[in-house]
Amino acid sequence: MPTPLIERYGEHLSLEAGDPVVTLNEGSTPLIHSPRLSERVGAEVHLKFEGANPTGSFKDRGMTVAVSRAKGRGAEAVICASTGNTAASAAAYAARAGLRGAVIVPEGKIAVGKLAQALMHGARVIALQGNFDQALTIVRALAESHPIELVNSVNRYRIEGQKTAAYEVCDELGEAPDALAIPVGNAGNVTAYWAGFQDRGASPVLYGFQAEGAAPLVEGHPIDQPETIASAIRIGNPARWEEAMNAFTASRGRVAAVSDQQILDAYRLLASSEGLFCEPASAASVAGLLAHGLPVAEGSEPPGSVVCVLTGHGLKDPDTALGKAPPVIGCEVDLAAVEKAVFD
Ligand code: AN7
């Protein structure tokens, strides 16, 4: 059973002495070697499967710390804007802590599994007739005028918790990888990985990927109406814009865009040839590596090792999976018919 992340890495987190540990035993996720991707890109590729966290995404790493601190300082409720995973995680950790939770999500634009999670954990779910960026602006204002803790990644404890994924990668490989490929939405996670690597004195090349229709960092300006099938990263004005761009520059990496088709191809490839079912947004890391090739910093050798972060579980979004998968084969109760269905 994984040790709670706060117990494992507490000395690197700035929780206060009296804070409770609100945990679901998050973190310690598998780092899985991929022989096929390694061969295809010409470097050793490992996949960090963050879908193995308790609510099925990397958000749990930040949420254990943010909700522990919120509870420690006497908050009675937490709030966030979310494309889905933050909502699911905030709702679960709020339930665990005995706090009330409210989540604001873009109406009709979050995967159904995430919605089910937020509702089941007892959060108040508000579907905003707008997008994530508008929801974030509103929750920031609400948190300033009400005694409610904001647990989006603008909350520093979220970033602190999420940087532990970089520690785990270094610990498991015995050293930092040469490069890290990661999907980018609100840009909190890439900021967190960079902080974690810096804590370890490491500077892997950061290679961030946004969906083509929601690629503000690539285009250099906010996108008013972001669009992508990868609903988790349908974000047009990332809160951690500057930190993320600084991290790309400092690591001599870059941020690039991948099309929805490239995302879906990688999504299917990971499921069908690696046995790893991640959600579409997560597949952006692998899509980017396949579409753009290995990141090579100027004046350096190509990386020998790359870690791709698979940020969330494929079960979150059954609609996209079933919409893209081959049909189920119906069959009557008859040996010959089943034989034909199986072997033909
Ligand atoms: C699976 O849940 O923003 O760049 O509100 O769910 O740190 O935002 C989710 C983001 C990548 C992007 N992969 O991470 C939310 C939310 C998955 C995600 C990202 C998200 P950031």
Image (tube, rainbow, N blue to C red):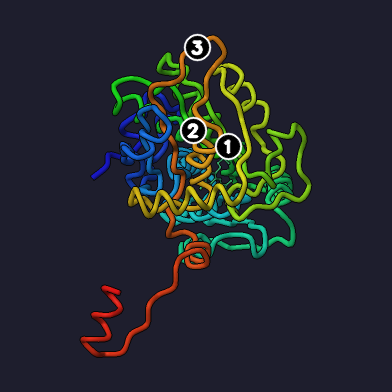
**Residue placed under numbered mark 3 in the picture:** 300
Comparing 145 with 241, the one in front is 241
Quadrant of picture, ligand 1: top right
**Residue 49 location, quadrant:** top left
Q: Residues within 10 Å of mark 3 (few under 14, many from 20)?
A: few
Q: Are marks 2 and 1 in contact (CB under 8 Å)?
A: yes
Separation (CA) of disc 3 from disc 2: 17 Å
5 vs 230: above or below: above
**Residue placed under numbered mark 2 in the picture:** 181
Name the residue rendered at 39%, 45% in the picture.
22
Disc number placed over residue 209 in the picture, else none? 1
Name the residue rendered at 40%, 35% in the picture.
40
Comparing 80 with 131, the one in front is 131
Q: Is residue 314 visible?
A: yes
- Callout 2: SS: strand
Separation (CA) of disc 2 from disc 1: 8 Å
**Residue 335 location, quadrant:** bottom left
Report the mark closest to the observer, 3 or 2.
3
Q: Percent from the top left, x then y, of residue 125?
A: 59, 63
- Callout 3: SS: loop
Q: Amino acid at mark 3?
A: Ser
Comparing 71 with 85, the one in front is 85
Q: Residues within 10 Å of mark 2 (few under 14, many from 20)?
A: many
Name the residue rendered at 50%, 55% in the picture.
88
Q: Is residue 122 visible?
A: no
184 vs 319: above or below: above
Q: Amino acid at mark 1?
A: Phe
Q: Percent from the top left, x then y, of residue 299?
A: 54, 9
